[in-house]
Amino acid sequence: MFKDTNLIEFFKDIVVPPVCPVCGNISPELICPACKSKIEKIDGDVCKYCGRPISDYKKSWTIADADKYAHDICSLCRKEKFSFYMHRSFAFYKGAVRKIMHKYKYGKMYGLSKVLVGFLKQAYDKYYRKEEIDYVEAVPGEHMQILCSEFSRVIKIPFAGNIIKIKKTPRQQTLDLYQRKNNLKEAFKVRNSLLASGKNILLIDDIWTTGSTLNEISKVLKNSNADKIYLLTIAGGT
Ligand SMILES: [Zn+2]
Ligand SMILES: [Zn+2]
């Protein structure tokens, strides 16, 4: 026989209808249609390397713009030499997407991984489906490991978990760009270099801000002779 508290727990799952994690309204889908329609995907023209929107450049184009194709590369990528092959992001980091990511990461509502995996899958299908990717990798951290192993099952590409963090670092958000790069020096390590050697790897993170962390891990993988590093994040746009 159930104790009372067990009984409440038991019925809670059955009786409470699913609610939208963004607005709290009852919803038959993972996110209600109203909230879903407000998600701002990164759909316009993007930099061919880092995936940041570059539509603002294009507004100023003239038909006679001789240097037209140079505009497919953003100002950041013209200065930086990134170690990854390319990066793409699903949506802008705001509104519903931001709310769900917060609940997942800081509220540890790991049940929301299904929604986030769905976001990653949409971006993957759009940009990377035709690429020959050997395995999926996550930026170290519990929430990303859970997400990435689930995502790997969905796209049917193995998840390696071959990257580890070997240095405690202050949160990137508290630092400027220069400090961010230094902060990450020798922070990551590839567990087994042979596994990375000659492979095309899809590296997943939640947010693209300056790309410092993702680039640092890409560098470490490249040092293990990895071939192409594809990056995929849920949100970005900066
Ligand atoms: Zn909603
Ligand atoms: Zn770029």
Image (tube, helix red, strand yellow):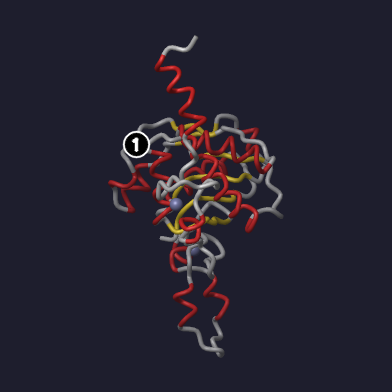
Does 165 appear above or below 134?
Answer: above
Q: Is residue 141 left or right of residue 134?
A: left
Residue at x-position 57% and y-position 56%: 86
Q: Quadrant of residue 108?
A: top left
Q: Is residue 51 left or right of residue 127?
A: left
Which residue is nearer to you in this view: 39 or 236?
A: 39
Q: Is residue 119 left or right of residue 129?
A: left
Q: Is residue 218 visible?
A: no
Which residue is nearer to you in this view: 130 or 22?
A: 22
Residue at x-position 36% and y-position 32%: 168
Please provide percent x and percent y for residue 188. Answer: 46, 36
Please provide percent x and percent y for residue 191. Answer: 55, 29
Residue at x-position 53% and y-position 52%: 83
Q: Secondary structure at mark 1?
A: loop
Residue placed under numbered mark 1 in the picture: 169
Please provide percent x and percent y for residue 47. Answer: 52, 66
Q: Is residue 183 visible?
A: yes
Quadrant where the image shows the C terminus: bottom left
Which residue type carries mark 1?
Thr
Disc 1 crowd rating (10 Å Cα; few below 14, some 14-19, many 20+) is few
Which residue is nearer to you in this view: 130 or 175?
A: 130
Does 77 appear above or below 198?
Answer: below
Residue at x-position 41% and y-position 39%: 105
